[in-house]
Amino acid sequence: MVDMAMTLRLDDELDLQVQRLAEAQGISKQQLLVRAAQEYVDRESRLARTLGNADRIVRENAGLLDRLGQ
């Protein structure tokens, strides 16, 4: 995998918050933001899988759900 360079512009307040949090954790702002991005991607992927599974379960059990609703 090749690392990609990018520029990220933060407003002053957010930059200060990121700096303080990174310092508190003993890591760079870069590391903090990469971790945050990865956690966000992981969370959204889990949510998409969960919603997909829920849709599948509803489709596969539509008859049962209809009978239970009567």
Image (cartoon, rainbow, N blue to C red):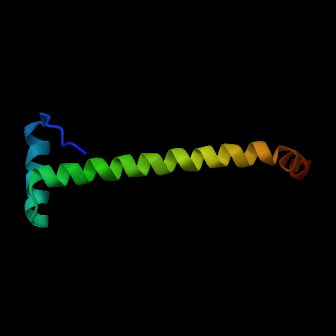
Q: Furthest-front residue in view?
A: 1
Residue at screen point 91% across, 49% down: 67
Judge by depth and name the residue closer to the eye, 2 or 8. Answer: 2
Give the percent coordinates (x, y) of residue 18: 13, 51
In the picture provided, is 56 more to the left or to the right than 69?
left
Residue at screen point 7% across, 61% down: 23
Residue at screen point 15% across, 54% down: 31
Residue at screen point 18% across, 43% down: 3
Q: Number of labelled discs?
A: 0
Q: Name which quarter of the figure residue 55 lies in.
A: top right
Q: Quadrant of the N terminus?
A: top left
Judge by depth and name the residue closer to the eye, 10 or 53. Answer: 53
In the picture provided, is 68 more to the left or to the right than 2?
right
Give the percent coordinates (x, y) of residue 45: 45, 47
Give the percent coordinates (x, y) of residue 42: 39, 51
Q: Is the residue 36 above or below the residue 5 in the image?
A: below
In the picture provided, is 26 more to the left or to the right than 57?
left
Q: Is the residue 5 above or below the residue 69 in the image?
A: above
Give the percent coordinates (x, y) of residue 6: 14, 34
